[in-house]
Amino acid sequence: MSQPQYLTGQREALQEFLSKYDIFLFDCDGVLWSGDHLFDGTVATLEFLRASGKRVVFVTNNSTKSRKDYCKKLEGMGIPATEEEVFGSSYSAAIYISRILPQRHPELKSKPKVFVIGESGIEQELDSENVPHIGGTDSSLRRLGINPEDYTKIAAGDPSVLDPEVGVVLTGLDFHFNYIKMCLAYHYIKRGAIFLATNIDSTLPSAGALFAGAGTMAAPLTMMLGGTEPVALGKPSQAMMDAIEGKFKFDRSRTCMVGDRANTDIKFGLEGKLGGTLGVLTGVGTKEEFTEGDTRPHFYVDRLSDLLAAKEA
Ligand SMILES: O=C(O)[C@H](O)[C@H](O)COP(=O)(O)O
Ligand SMILES: [Mg+2]
């Protein structure tokens, strides 16, 4: 397996690297920022790339925000962006549910609703595709524990707690995850609902450390279901890559994926047969993973702003 080329501090190698690509797909968490902490030089680097005629698309697995929310976050951090330049796992899942799934599962016509475990980003993107949904940020589900009547009603399939029109369960990063949501999702799936996830990242980088990722919302269901894994629509899913290519019509050979996580971002770029992948060491991935792991980027740098060294003096 080839060794990735380390580019930090290598002006000529960085210039040659940049000359290979017209479009950069940018992961967000762990590359541009850690939570709400913007990494130094991020704005200058994106401005440099855009001034050099490069196209920038933000491709994030973070399903808590919609494209509109991400535009606000990016603008707030001094990074101009349009909704057209943002592609998140919530949007990828919403497109899949509204446009791909009905072709494969005609039975969903009578079960159009999605039971959501996740935050507002998923609800907004399902709304953008006119997909009806329940759960999510519903305050009646943001409670601790479970009542005796919950047990009896769920066990009996009472339609007042198990909506008979739910045909899909979609999990994503949920900061209000709890027992009742898990039990409802399990019973929907046992009753035939299709098990999907926006993404199954194990951890979430924030404040320079790691926290529970979206995958930890799906994992308990997989255990309860005896090992059944969800179909995940975020990176590295090629359904997401195909949707992005369909929207931006880019030349894959002239496109580079920039990310901090080997098993999502780098795998996404490699399996998508992009012209290149660049790992950055400011998020989840480590130098050992990038240089000795099973999924290695073509290139890697310590931090995104190292690309600025390519600028002519
Ligand atoms: O747990 C998660 O959902 C992920 O850690 C997080 O959302 C990753 O976001 P990305 O690095 O793809 O921007
Ligand atoms: Mg990331």
Image (cartoon, rainbow, N blue to C red):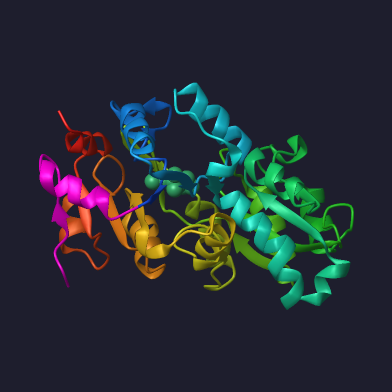
Number of dots carrying numbers:
0
Which residue is located at x 55 percent, y 48 percent? 88
Residue 89 is situated, as x and y percent measured from the top left of the image, at 55, 52
Observer able to see residue 191: no
20 or 151, which is in the foreground? 20
- Is 71 contained in the magenta span? no
What x and y, as percent, mark residue 27? 41, 46
**Residue 3 position by quadrant:** bottom left
Q: Quadrant of residue 100?
A: bottom right
Q: Say which quadrant the C terminus sits in.
A: top left
Q: Is residue 25 visible?
A: yes
Please report the residue visible at 30 percent of the width from the left and 60 percent of the height from the top: 276
Image-based side of 304 in relation to 263, left or right: left
Residue at 54% x, 65% y is 242
Can you say which quadrant of the picture contains the N terminus? bottom left
Relative depth, front residue between 293 and 5: 5
Q: Residue at x 31, y 46 (%)?
A: 284
Nearer-the-camera pick, 3 or 46: 46
Where's residue 216, x and y in %? Answer: 49, 52
- Along the horizontal axis of the image, is 169 left or right of 84? right
Q: Establish if 27 lies above or below 229.
A: above
Q: Find residue 277 and report its horizontal and vertical position in percent.
A: 30, 57
Which region of the structure is painted magenta? 1-21
